[in-house]
Image (tube, rainbow, N blue to C red):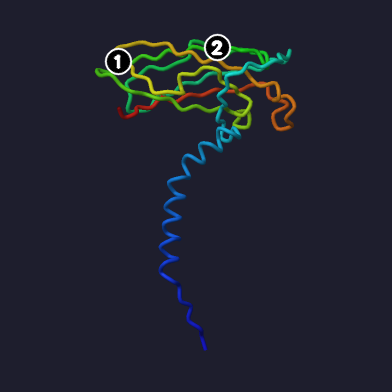
Amino acid sequence: MSKTFKINPKYLVILVAGMIGLSFASVPLYDLFCRVTGFGGTTQKTNKLSNIILNKKIKVRFDANVSSNLSFNFKPLKNFSEVKVGEVNTIIFKVENQGAKSENVISTFNTSPTIVGKYFQKLQCFCFEKQLIKSKEIKEFTVAYYIDPKIVDDPATKGTNEITLSYSLFKVKD
């Protein structure tokens, strides 16, 4: 003999509503997780300087990419810098709208290797906000950053000698 199992419809409605709520919350929760942990190469935003500067240098390479639906030229003024761990450095990116109309853009960013993202501290970055670039306009964007000295104490990043900071520029709605 088999027993029949009855489910109260009330519980099904609650379950479905909960699943829908979690699906909407997943994006901001994932973003928060990445920012806190540096997961996926997500860099950190800070407003405090490092109080320690090490004699260890790391080569930081800069990479810039543009979404295929933009007529933009986007590149760093330097391809790389040799930086002391803990010392504030700056890099300038040049952005040119080669299209016929103004565009609102925003950039996403990450580091490679991804494990170093939590040690890449940004003090100033154009990537934190939407930018309006007019037709034929050229702008320069500055990134001020330092590499947290804790990078040398972490067994997973101890031997890191090179980091790539990569940006991708995307069109956004008004």
Work out which quarter of the rendered image holds the C terminus and state it: top left
Q: Residue furthest left?
A: 100
The residue nearer to you, when weighing 69 against 2, is 2
- Residue 84, quarter of the rendered image: top right
Vertical comparison of 37 with 81: above or below = below
Task: Please indicate whether residue 161 sits to the left or right of residue 64 in the image.
Answer: right
Residue neighbourhood size for the residue with mark 2, other residues' Cα within 10 Å, grouped as few (<14), some (14–19), many (≥20) = some
Residue sitting nearer the eye, 31 or 65:
31
Q: Which residue is mark 1?
A: 134
**Dot 1 crowding, Cα within 10 Å, few <14, some 14–19, many 20+:** some
* Place of residue 150 in the rendered image (x, y in percent of width and height, measured from the top left): 71, 25
The amino acid sitting under disc 2 is: Thr
Residue 135 coordinates in the image, percent (x, y): 28, 15
State left or right for residue 145 relative to residue 17.
right
Front one among 79 and 172: 172
Residue depicted at 55% across the width and 14% down the height: 144
Residue at the spot of label 2: 90
Measured as percent of width and height from the top left, residue 90 is found at: 55, 11
Q: Quadrant of residue 86?
A: top right
Residue under the point 55% across and 24% down: 45
> How far apart are the alpha carbons under marks 1 and 2?
25 Å
Residue at 42 percent of width and 67 percent of height: 10
Which badge, 1 or 2, is on the more N-terminal residue? 2
Marks 1 & 2, CB-CB < 8 Å contact: no
SS for tag 2? strand
Residue at the limit of the structure toward the front, as seen here: 10
Q: Secondary structure at mark 1?
A: loop
Three-letter amino acid code at the position of disc 1: Lys
Image quadrant in which you'd find residue 146: top right
Taking the spot 47% from the left edge, 39% from the top edge, the residue there is 28
Numbered tag placed on residue 5 in the rendering:
none
